[in-house]
Amino acid sequence: MARAVAESIDRDPERLGLARARTTCERWLREYGPDPNVEEWRGIISRSWEEIRRTLLDESERGARLRQNSPFAGVLPPRQRWDIYRKFRDDSTAT
């Protein structure tokens, strides 16, 4: 999912997905109050796209943890997200 998000933002010269993620962070903070995970993402998405992209695709434990609360969730259209979920499910059940 993170790769698809990064590719989507890469293809968009206006980086609208990045703007959407920033808006999502601000909305979460406004609606739910302080949260260390959201604050961490807020700091990350204030950086350059190259740095944000590296963090988004980071395969470390930190990267996995961050993706559990990703403000990028709404960047991809629902159909594309479901296609990714379906492919992941099919790949993990095929043995």
Image: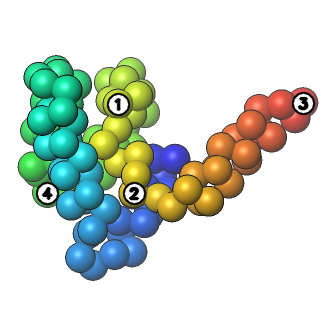
Q: CA distance from mark 4 to mark 1?
A: 20 Å
Tag 3 and tag 1, C-beta contact below 8 Å: no
Q: CA distance from mark 2 to mark 1?
A: 14 Å
Q: Nearer the viewer, residue 58 or 89?
A: 89
Give the residue drawn at x 48%, y 52%: 3
The label on residue 95 is 3
Mark 4 or 1: in front is 1
Q: Nearer the viewer, residue 50 or 89?
A: 89
Q: Nearer the viewer, mark 3 or mark 1?
A: 1
Write the residue at 52% across / 47% down: 1
Q: Position of residue 95 (x, y in %)?
A: 90, 30
Residue 48's label in the rendered image is: 4
Task: Categorize mark 4 by other alpha carbons within 10 Å: few (<14), some (14-19), many (20+).
Answer: few
Q: Earlier in the sequence, mark 4 or mark 3?
A: 4
Q: Foreground: 91 or 68?
A: 68
Amino acid at the residue labelled 3: Thr
Task: State the SS at label 2.
Answer: loop
**Which disc, if any, is residue 69?**
1
Give the image location of residue 77, x and y in percent.
51, 61
Between residues 49 and 19, which one lies in front from this camera angle? 19
